[in-house]
Amino acid sequence: QVIYLNGEFVSKEDAKVSVYDHGFLYGDGIFEGIRIYNGNIFKCKEHLDRLYDSAKSIMLNIDLTPAEMEAAMAETIRRNGLKDGYIRLVVSRGPGNLGLDPNRCPKSNVIIIVEQLAIYKDEDYENGLKVVSVSTRRNIPDALNPKIKSLNYLNNILVKIQANLAGVGEALMLNSQGYVTEGSGDNIFIIKNGVLTTPPSYLGALEGITRAAIMELCGKLGYTVKEEPFALHDVYVADEVFLTGTAAEVIAVQQVDGRTIGAGKAGPITTHLLKEFRKIVEIDGVK
Ligand code: PLP
């Protein structure tokens, strides 16, 4: 396995950055998680747009242009000989001193890791995940806008810890008003009477690229999808609930806080969307 580190390709053992990197000291940086399907970078433009928007928002300079970044990802994939897998793209503020001031960090670190993906098992897609809601609140937008895919994932990690303690795979975060926002690393959709609803990102959710792909797919397949706030009650009484994310794709939810959703397995619309989504990624891969 070779890793891209600031223009060089190094082995996993040699892929090291300074302990003075502000990404390490303060979580000062951004990242992307991207899929490779059939040797192609899925939704490359969308991921790069989000990365460069995040960078702009936190005034982080990336030495590479988006085209150069794409070429660097493609070369990393080629050198690792992967047809299907996952790309972790990290840009940190880079090494500085112990002070917070980003001006002390003259050069950002750009890291590209390409790996096989340990995805959910087939039966998880068929049976759905058990999830719980947790007390950790999603960052409120005026603290750190969740649209920024930053290296500050402590909130999400606290959510994951609560999920682990509850013995389930994923958990739902509410915002400070009590509206459902998203999971620790995925967006949520609920379905009631054939209509899909996902929380608007202003409530405090990352604008997931899989979420957008599913909304587009819904349009093509003739499903109505709305972006509207909803509460946990609406999740409990939904006919179907599913999560979307780069790694998870489209995964059904079987149970929320002990309430069984629908028939307690992936429902017909969720199953249909997963099937159609997988067709798209294959077609996009062939391009
Ligand atoms: N929400 C959070 C907090 C995430 O970290 C992710 C993963 O990137 C998502 C949602 C899903 O976004 P995407 O579909 O772009 O992977």
Image (cartoon, rainbow, N blue to C red):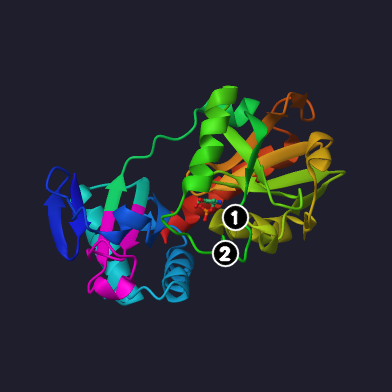
Mark 2 is surrounded, within 10 Å at the Cα level, by few (under 14), some (14 to 19) or many (20 or more) other residues, namely: some
Is there CB contact under 8 Å for labels 1 and 2? yes
- Highlighted magenta segment, given as a residue range: 88-112
Q: Which residue is drawn at 66% across and 61% down?
A: 201
Q: Residue at x 70, y 27 (%)?
A: 265
Q: Residue at x 77, y 30 (%)?
A: 261
Quadrant of residue 23 within the rendered picture = bottom left
Residue 129: image location, x then y, percent: 62, 29
115, 181: nearer the viewer = 181
95, 254: nearer the viewer = 95
- State left or right for residue 241 relative to residue 251: right
Amino acid type, residue under disc 1 in the picture: Asn
Looking at the image, residue 16 lies above or below residue 269? below
* Element carrying mark 2: loop
Residue 139's disc is: 1
Is the CB–ligand 1 distance for label 2 below 8 Å?
Answer: no
Pick the quarter of the image with the N terminus: top left
Q: Which residue is drawn at 75% across and 44% down?
A: 190
Residue 200 seen from this side: yes
Pick the quarter of the image with the C terminus: bottom left
Quadrant of residue 25 within the rendered picture = bottom left
